[in-house]
Amino acid sequence: MSSYPPIADHGMIGDLQTAALVSSEGSIDWWCTPRFDSPSIFASLLDSERGGYCRLAADLLPGNGLTIRQLYLSDTAVLITRFMAPSGVGEVADFMEPLDTTVPTGQHRLLRVARVVRGTLPFTFTCRPRFDYGRAPHTVTQLDRRSALFHGPNTDLRLQATGPIAFEADSTDVSASFTLSAGEVAAVVLTSDAPGSVEPEPLSLKAIRDDLESCRRFWLTWLRSCTYRGRWKNEVYRSAITLKLLTYAPSGAPIAAATAGLPEQVGGERNWDYRYTWIRDASLSVRSLIDLGFTAEAQAFRRWLRNRLTDGGTASGEPLQIMYRIDGDPQLTEETLDHFEGYRGSAPVRVGNAAADQIQLDIYGEAADALGLAGDIGGVRGWQAFAAMLDWLTEHWDRPDEGIWETRGGQRDFTYSRLMTWVAFDRGIRLATQASRPADIPRWTRARDAVFNQIIERGWSQKRQAFVQHYDTDVLDASLLLMPRVGFLSPHDPAWLSTLDAMGHELVSDSLVYRYDPEASPDGLRGSEGTFNLCSFLYVEALARSGRLVQARYAFDKMLTYANHVGLFAEEIGPSGEQLGNFPQAFTHLALVAAAMALDDELDAAENTPR
């Protein structure tokens, strides 16, 4: 096993409360439990020696004719890793049982099932947990030849196996070697739970087969709600499953990505923890979920969002803060894991996120838009909290902030932030009017119009003939690709088309889109970054809505070539096409869905237009 496989060399499995990454070499390189934002048990992605992993793979070197392929069982989150060699062909199925419940669960089961379909194949199994991000010692007790118990701080990890696997334990780890012939099956189950919990049921291959079939049926049944029938069904379905896997079922809150600390530049310092719920990311996902037919998931997040407004629990005293833990806790203290070397030496490794304390005024527009899609803010108390948020915003919209990209170079008058405050007032006025709710509509209207006029006067660069990142620069910013979607400008407005052209010349490289130019607009961090996948898909959507269909479709098709072998995207694409940043990223996948649906709409309209 290589020390650090490529970030993209992984598939994701999960149970809707936590998630694990499995490499194509059969190694679980990342797993935090009992929640997405809990400390890790396996984190070899961040330190190959200290992080811990669990590997189940064919015991052959690639030079011996071994070929490895990885895929998802169609339309499910069951990950299959196939090992093909002259002596035989085998596979390992990795999955977790979906816990689609409003009750947080302490026990989580990760199942690994090996079988051989032709010939004979040797396997090895190694389990090296490292609790609390590799900081805490643990003990291991071999209970019998086919079970063992790792005891760490606040967490037990139990191993159970079916024959012919027989464990051997040393002071900290467990390993096994075994051989399977055609038709034979063996399984390992890892169960995490609080210390002293009830012992899991004994294993049987029949029960494991039943678990696998139950998992498969869950995903196929869930996908039946999807209304998408467009041209990119496989890609949209995989993105939908990924978004579901990244949503914490007990609260309905989606996380930004499954991982922490994966770098935007290998060897650089742009390494952040994305296992939290950003108001922005999650709110933008609501429209994609509704458009796909997943109304229950959209409604669950809106409830979570309304609770954040009515709770009023923010460190700053503002109506909302930019991100929360998945249960709504606003405390995300950032710390550095100095004992981890970071992915391929990319340090520091951070957990928690200090950006939670930043001022980013755009979140009020995204929140208002997400809540407004329901047409009902949530009863009297919900409306009162929503109206109070807009009343507050009338007094605070005209001030600098850190902006959508969470730069650490100081506050600015970011155009995107102003754009989304305009959205907040616009949606609030519509809702109050449509639902006949009490509101200071004249005051909101004055604020909305003042924001609009300010953006036109100060956010527009006569020199660039484009809307720019903030009022004191001529630098462009790809976040403004959302201008037509939110209704600020028509996608055919000359000012917008001119902005789109400018972005195409400065920010776009072979369909890949940079967020902005950090050299022209310093962001307070050293190093560079790759192109941002969210922006690349927003560019496709903007091209499509502006009528540039040939260019949009070609850009979309090229973007799809950057997906990994199982259809997943990280945050960014590097200079050589490698995936960078936390993985997989929800923002990217929701933008893929929006781009596909925009292309479908515009292509259908063009095909139905008489010549």
Image (cartoon, helix red, strand yellow):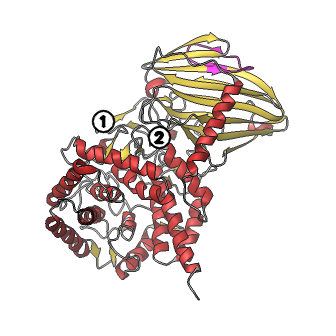
Q: CA distance from mark 2 to mark 1?
A: 17 Å
From the viewer's side, name the closer residue of 499 and 237: 237
Q: Is residue 30 left or right of residue 79?
A: left
Assign the N terminus to one quadrant of the image: top right
Residue 169 part of the magenta segment:
yes
| Residue bearing mark 2 | 259
**Does 48 sit above or below residue 318?**
above
Going from the N terminus, do you reach mark 2 or mark 1 first? 2
Magenta span covers which residues? Answer: 160-175
Q: Are marks 2 and 1 in contact (CB under 8 Å)?
A: no
The secondary element bearing badge 1 is classed as loop
**Residue 545 marker:** none
Label 2 Cα crowd, 10 Å radius (few <14 / some 14-19 / many 20+): many
Assign the C terminus to one quadrant of the image: bottom right
From the viewer's side, name the closer residue of 385 and 10: 385
Q: Magenta-highlighted stretch: main secondary structure? A: loop
Q: Is residue 56 left or right of residue 223?
A: right
| Residue bearing mark 1 | 333
On the image, the x and y values in percent for residue 131 come to 47, 24
Q: Amino acid at mark 2?
A: Thr
